Amino acid sequence: MSPQIGRAALGWAAFLVLASGALLLTLSPGTPEFVVTLFTLCLGLLLGLIVVVGVVWTRRREKREGGSQ
């Protein structure tokens, strides 16, 4: 994973989580806006998890390939 792609994706994930988290505090549960915002929060968390897993996997792979030489 390119560092620029990972950094941009992590920035988007943080934006989605922070924005939707702030909106959830102001919306009343049961409304369509609340459901969409909750879905957006879950997508932001999923994107952040994918980025973190990708970075850890890439670092382990690089460490393993570098150590065998």
Image: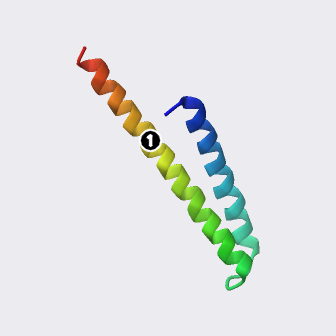
Residue 27 placement: quadrant: bottom right
What is the x, y in percent for residue 15? 68, 51
Q: Residue 53: where, in percent of width, then height?
A: 42, 45
Residue at left 55%, top 57%?
45
Is 69 above or below relative to 52?
above
- Residue under pointer 1: 54
Give the residue drawn at x 57%, y 64%.
42
Residue 12 in the image, given as x and y percentages of width and height: 65, 48
* Label 1: few (<14), some (14–19) or many (≥20) C-alpha neighbours in 10 Å: some
Q: Residue at x 60, y 31 (%)?
A: 4
Quadrant, the C terminus = top left
Is label 1 in a helix, a strand or a loop? helix
Residue located farthest toward the top when viewing the structure as drawn: 69
Residue at 61%, 69% in the rendered image: 39
Q: Is residue 33 above or below residue 10?
A: below
Using residue 69 as the reference point, say whether residue 1 is left or right of it.
Answer: right
Residue closest to the far right:
26
Q: Is residue 22 above or below residue 51?
A: below
Q: Amino acid at mark 1?
A: Gly
Comparing 1 with 38, the one in front is: 1
